[in-house]
Structure formats: C-alpha cells, structure tokens
Image (cartoon, rainbow, N blue to C red):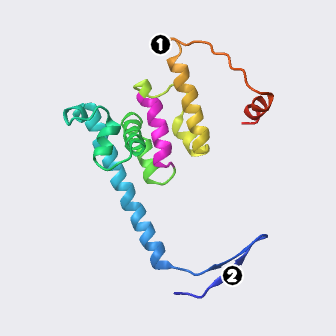
Amino acid sequence: MGSTVVIRTDRRSVDATPDPEGLRLVREGARGLLEAELALGKALARIHENNAHAYEGSASLQEFGRRHNLSGQRTLTLFRAAAGMRLDERIEPAVRAGAVTMDAAAVIGRVLFRLGALDPDHDWLEMARGLAIQKLAAAARRRIAELDQGRVSLCTMTFHVPEETVEKFGRA
C-alpha cells in the first residue's frame, strides 16, 4: 500500500490511504452487478409479459421477486428499466456507459411503459442525464398524472391544516 495522506477541509481532516486493489475490486464488482441487473431486468420483463409470475403462484411481479430473494422495490426497478429499454433503444447504452443510473432508467421506463411508446412531448433520456433522481421522479409522476387525466375519475379534496404546514409545503 502507499503512504497515508492527510486531507484537510474547512471542518475536519481525513487520513486517506490509497487502495488500488480495493478500487479494482469495486470497479469489477460494479461492472458485474450492472450486467447481472440488466439480464435480470430483461428476464423480469419477459416473466411479466407472459404473466408467468401468476403461473408460478405469485399475485404480482413484486411478490414473484420476493419469492426469489429480491425486494419488491428492486424487482419493480429492474422491470421498469428493462421495459423502458425495450421502448427506447438509447437507454441501455446510456446505462452501460454510466450516463444514466438503473434507477433513472426505471423512472423513464415507468413513463414509457405507461404510454406504451416513446413520449412525443418529452425526451426522458436527456432529462435523466440532467436532473437529480428526485426531480426526474417528480416529473414522471406529473406526466403520469397528465396521462391519467380523463382515464381515471378524479375528485376534489379539501384539507384543513395549520398555517405552519402550509408554509412547509410552500418551501418544499
């Protein structure tokens, strides 16, 4: 190993030692994990397309994932990313290149899967490259709400909340 370097910031100092072998292991592991996630997402999309999860006794794709040691959320993330990749061929190369995360690909996939095609009003891939995941997800929720307008009956709700809550919502 190399020598220890002390890195000082305005508030603290950190003793940092180079670890080329650890770095190599992380890089290799991350590459392998990405390949595994891409393959698993495609397999989940295939299972969903054929409703094979129901044949296997699972009520939903999330339940199917849990039965195979995946969290329901991770199952949806991988499925949605793969669904988006089927509809927009630019997504997978962007994920492989590290320009877009699997989580961002899943957000894109959620919108495109809902549409069943590319979104003529938005370039979701460009949005994923430029927005934080929270902002991308918020934009996706807004777009899905737009799509649901007219297809889902909406009702008006009135909430009575303290003034402090109104202020907090205004800042959010």
Q: Residues within 10 Å of mark 2 (few under 14, many from 20)?
A: few
Rendered residue at 49%/78% (across/down): 20
Q: Could you give the CA–CA distance between mark 1 and mark 2, rounded to whole angstroms?
A: 60 Å
Answer whether residue 112 is magenta in the image: yes
Q: Position of residue 78 (x, y in %)?
A: 39, 44
Q: Specify the quadrant of the image occupied by residue 133.
A: top right
- Residue receiving disc 2: 6
- Residue receiving disc 1: 151
Q: Position of residue 119 (x, y in %)?
A: 49, 27
The residues colored magenta run 100-113
Identify whether 145 is placed above or below 80: above
Answer yes or no: do the residues labelled 1 and 2 have beta carbons within 8 Å?
no
Q: Is residue 121 visible?
A: no
Circle nearer the N terminus (1, 2): 2
Residue type at mark 2: give it. Answer: Val
Q: Position of residue 120 (x, y in %)?
A: 51, 25
Q: Which mark is residue 25?
A: none
Q: Position of residue 39 (x, y in %)?
A: 31, 49
SS at circle 1: loop
Rendered residue at 77%/27% (across/down): 162
Identify whether 163 is placed above or below 82: above
Rendered residue at 55%/20% (across/down): 146
Q: Is residue 87 visible?
A: yes
Quadrant of image for the C terminus = top right
Answer whether residue 118 is magenta in the image: no
Rendered residue at 48%/73% (across/down): 23
| Magenta residues, dominant SS class | helix
SS at circle 2: strand
Residue type at mark 1: give it. Answer: Arg
Residue 159 vs residue 102, the one in the foreground: 159
- Judge from the rendering whether residue 127 lies leftward or rightward of residue 76; answer left or right: right
- Judge from the rendering whether residue 124 lies leftward or rightward of residue 13; answer left or right: left
